[in-house]
Image: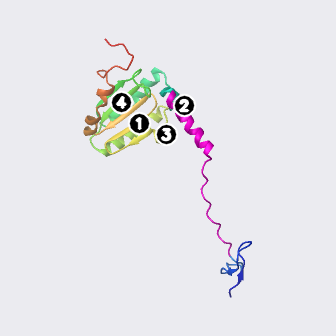
Amino acid sequence: MTRTGTSRAGSKPGPAKPAAKGGTAAAPKPAARPRATPPASLKASAAALRKRQIAAGPDAVPKRPRKSKVTPDRLEQLVAVARTSLEDDKAEDIRVLDVTGRSDFTDCMIIATGQVERQLQAMAVHVEEALEKAGRKLRRSDIQASPDWVLIDAGDLVIHLFRPEARATYALERMWGPESPAPEGAASG
């Protein structure tokens, strides 16, 4: 049985939709709404803010806040925990670099080598577990991994785990080590 009726006010009658369970006609689907665009005044004010920030220089652009700073004793403890974990996993050429005053994002870096991707992943998991036992819980976003390099950001301690080829390519020891160039404004000699 078909039925003819009107679908919306002011519309012409059309064929009725088949009845749904329970004997009533199914409701028509609402039309897709067009996406709203921001008003021109909002776009203009955002553009003006960007121009003011650029004109004021890099200090005007807000920086990502640094994780809370730990005491030197606490940092030494975290370094010892991470180093022990890496040594237990047979990491090679473990280097601890003090970058206090040379880096805005950390005070200490540990660089170590693993031979294969699987070893890097195991070292990262074990370091994370060891740091958590020592009271430094990491978020999922604090560990970045690729087949050749794992980066663990524990705030004042950043750990880089490399395969040998990637470690030679990036040469972080030359960039951050004691023989690296002094930061701008630092007295040399």
Residue located beneath label 2 in the image: 52
The answer to whether residue 54 is magenta is yes
Out of 100 and 184, give the one closest to the viewer: 184
Residue located beneath label 1 in the image: 152
At label 3, which amino acid type do we have? Arg
At label 4, which amino acid type do we have? Ile
Work out whether 32 lies above or below 65: below
**Which label lies toward us, 2 or 1?**
2
The answer to whether residue 100 is magenta is no
Q: What element carries label 2?
A: helix
Q: Quadrant of residue 182?
A: top left
Q: Where is residue 97 in the image (x, y as percent from the top left)?
A: 35, 25
| Whether residue 52 is visible | yes
Distance, label 2 to label 1, CA atoms, is 36 Å
Distance, label 1 to label 4, CA atoms, is 10 Å
**Color encoding of the figure:** rainbow
Work out whether 48 lies above or below 36: above
Residue located beneath label 3 in the image: 139
Quarter of the image containing the C terminus?
top left
Q: Which of marks 1 and 3 is nearer the N terminus?
A: 3
At label 1, which amino acid type do we have? Ile
Q: Are marks 4 and 3 in contact (CB under 8 Å)?
A: no
* 10 Å crowding of disc 3: few (<14), some (14-19), many (20+): few
